Image: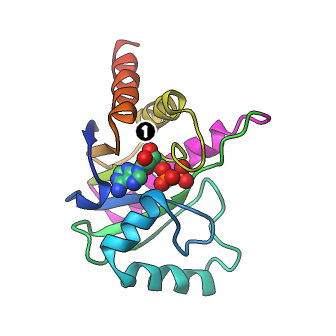
Amino acid sequence: MEIVLVQGDITEQDVDVVVNAANSSLLGGGGVDGAIHARGGPEILAECRALRVTALPDGLPAGKAVATTAGRLPARWVVHTVGPVFSTREDRTPVLRSAYRESLRVADELGARTVAFPAISAGAYGWPTDDAARVAITTVLDTPTEVQEVRFVLFGAATYDAFSAALQHSRRG
Ligand code: ADP
């Protein structure tokens, strides 16, 4: 599997799966979630609402993932996952790892070969950027998958640089 880093907007990626850093409600939010629903159109939210009624009455727990259509995005599917809110009292790294792993598991179920991830939990959920990058890169490298390209799409230069350093470190290690 190849890891590719891109500085840009995840809603513009021509990949099989775009991963959304959603919240447990699955009913939309800010950040990357807001951008995906705004650009992808109402079909994505309609499927999320249907999932809430059928499979997920209490919402999607942190560390889990679920797929919907990608609506008008260039991707084929959106895989919604929920990262943990960063905490100084408790190490929630296993939940962040699970968000990446479960997203790849759902992508494998769909038969996806190319998957774009944002920096899960690194925005509104407050995870320190360098650690979010390290966890993201090491988890993806450690996860058995049929996915051939994992593309991290980072919104700003600081996040891009953190992922770049984490990737270089993993290649040295
Ligand atoms: P979380 O609630 O999991 O922290 P956010 O959406 O607030 O999720 O932030 C996750 C990361 O996604 C942040 O680094 C943020 O800058 C970035 N981001 C926001 N919009 C986009 C976008 N359109 N494409 C890629 N990354 C984005």
Q: Is residue 149 above or below residue 64?
A: above
At a point 31% along the width and 71% down the height, the residue shown is 39
Q: Position of residue 112 (x, y in %)?
A: 30, 59
Residue extending farthest right: 89
Q: Which residue is mark 1?
A: 140
Numbered range of the magenta stretch: 89-113
* Residue 90 locus on image (x, y percent): 77, 36
Up the image or down, 72 lies above or below 94; here it is below
Q: State the image quarter where residue 173 is shown.
A: top left
Residue extending farthest top: 172
Q: Is residue 84 above or below residue 49?
A: above
Residue 98 part of the magenta-drawn span: yes
Question: Does residue 131 sit above or below 42 in this rendering?
Answer: above
Residue plotted at (64% across, 45% down): 95
| Residue occupying the point 31% across, 55% down | 10
Quarter-of-image position of residue 76: bottom left
Amino acid at the residue labelled 1: Val
- Decide whether the magenta segment is chiefly helix, strand or loop: helix
Q: Is residue 141 magenta?
A: no
